[in-house]
Image: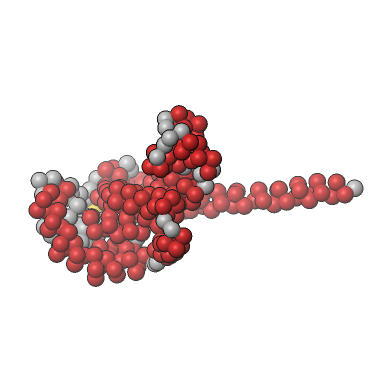
Amino acid sequence: MTMARQDIGDICFKRALMVFPYLVLLIVAGILLKLVIASWDSILKFGFSFLYTSTWDPVVEQFGALPFIFGTLVTSLVALLIAIPIGLGTAIYLAEYAPRRIYRTVAMMIDLLAAIPSVIYGLWGIFVLVPLMRSHIQPFLGKYFGFLPFFQGPNYGIGLLAASIILAVMIIPFITAVAREVIAAVPPVYKEAAYAMGATRWEAIKTIILSYGKPGIIGGIILALGRAIGETMAVTMVIGNNVKISSSLFSSGYTLASVIANEFAEAATKIYTSSLMEIGLVLLLVSMVVNILARVLIWSVTEKTSPQAALKGV
């Protein structure tokens, strides 16, 4: 009788828990459906040309999202290029080298960075980063790397590079926190085996720790990329909000999130509102595609990576 009661309780508990994942799927499907319905007029009028045309003119009601897609991808990727070495290096130092006192202090400050509201980052960008970019960073890059198209153009301080740096600062805590926990979770027996085979500390980190934790580290990077793609306020305040595509990181630009924040209140026509809703739909789809690709990448890395294989390379 007692076993029967336990079985009934387990079954009820299991079925109750099954509701929650389906509820999450229902919420995502509801958001997606609402965006599709709200942007349907724009989809019918512009079709796929909405994704590859550059005209954004509310006066003549011609809309194309390519400049915003370009700005979103450029700022996010440049932010990752800046944040990955800093975040991963910080995580390795904290997990493997830092004394306990330094570990606690730095880890607390990194966690604090993740909790700062984006508008505060935007204010810091306007009053600190932009003047620094205008006075020192962009003149330096233009002088020594001006032969590259990425570092040419007028020096206003605001632009794609400033937005990328803001995003890099915002996503470093995500990369560092995830990588730190992944590295700390590596079983000590693998590191001890590497040392027993004559590996130096750096060789153990490179061949064992990073190899073992690669799926988790990649997951943290993708989490940071998702944050960068969807960031709105801080980017809007320093990117310049100009509808154009330029090879120069000094030029101003626009992102998918910032155009919605800037122009939604001004949308006076139905097609204008519908086009902005389609921008939101594109942003959601881009985020979904990034996460799907991340899952596929993590699965492939997990299948190919094992501590035993890493030990053979020591």
- Give the x, y percent position of residue 218: 42, 43
Residue at the image point whose x is 36% and y is 45% from the top: 44
Given residues 243 and 73, the one toward you in this image is: 73
Q: Residue reaching furthest right?
A: 1
Given residues 117 and 16, the one toward you in this image is: 117
**Residue 91 shows up from this direction:** no
Which image quadrant: the C terminus? top left
Residue at the image point whose x is 27% and y is 55% from the top: 164
Q: Is residue 278 left or right of residue 136?
A: right
- Give the x, y percent position of residue 63: 27, 51
Residue at the image point whose x is 15% and y is 57% from the top: 138
Given residues 265 and 305, the one toward you in this image is: 305
Specify the color scheme. Answer: secondary structure
- Give the x, y percent position of residue 74: 27, 48
- Give the x, y percent position of residue 88: 38, 49
Residue at the image point whose x is 29% and y is 48% from the top: 81
**Residue 307 shows up from this direction:** yes
Given residues 82 and 249, the one toward you in this image is: 82
